[in-house]
Image (cartoon, rainbow, N blue to C red):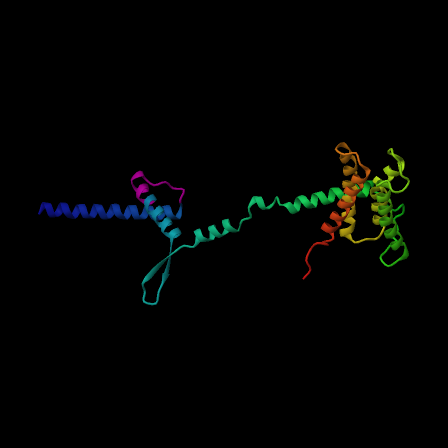
Amino acid sequence: RRFNIFIQSTKIQLSLIARELDWKMRWCLISPSIALPPSSSLGYGLRRRRFSSAITSFRIYATADGVEAPEAAEEPKEEHKLKSESPSPSSSSSPSALGKDLKKVVNKTAATFAPRASTASKNPAVPGTTLYKVFEVQGYASMLVGGILSFNLLFPSDEPDIWRLMGMWSIWMFTIPSLRARDCPSKEKEALNYLFLIVPLLNVAIPFFWKSFALVWSADTLAFFAMYSWKLGWLEKTE
């Protein structure tokens, strides 16, 4: 009889303790700032971690027959997509950016030092006009005459003279300025800007290795047509 009384009193005490713990847990959910005793906070923390991990890893859906079917969350896939779609830092530095910078430097240098119109009016040497043809004929004729002088065919001399020197520099002094004076397309103007900077380098560098007026003029002519074929696309196959 005493044993039964002891068991009943124990059950009552356990039920009271369970109610007190339940009340404290509910109160902590309402106001998280109140701390729990060490004995109950441990169990509550474990339950909360398990509950939060279950929420992040699974999504519960109700089916027609009342059975709950778990489905894996798609958050890692979304993160993977964002990482794959993020641009790589190496794509920012491309050869096209270097080419644009070089083009800007060449055009600015040529516009600063190359001969240009003294007025800000529109260029009258537009395609189809007489002035356009005059500048074009003058440019290629000066190239031809410069070749004749460089090869010592006109005003021949056994020693270097002013005529052969003018023939060597004829492409830079007469051909390129005459062609730039026209209202030519942007690609041709860009090619002439490059030539305005490349030809003097060739004329100064080549005599250090081979002192020949004819060789310098030939190198200038080769650079002229190579630049035109590159910028104007002469060697590209048309469909």
**In magenta segment, residue 41:** yes
Location of residue 214 (image quadrant): top right
Is residue 139 found left or right of 64 in the rendered image? Answer: right
Number of disc labels = 0
Query: Which is more toward the observer, 214 or 51?
Result: 214
Q: Residue at x 84, y 41 (%)?
A: 151
Span highlighted in magenta in the image: 32-44
Residue 183 on image: x %, y %? 83, 53
- Residue 221, image x, y percentages: 78, 45
Determine whether 75 is above or below 107 in the image.
Answer: below
56 with respect to 21 (left or right): right
* Residue 25 percent location from the top left of the image: 33, 47
Task: Determine if residue 115 is in view.
Answer: no
Residue at x 88% of width, y 47% of height: 117
With respect to residue 159, does 64 lie above or below? below
Quadrant occupied by the C terminus: bottom right
Query: Is 190 displayed left or right of 70 in the figure?
Result: right
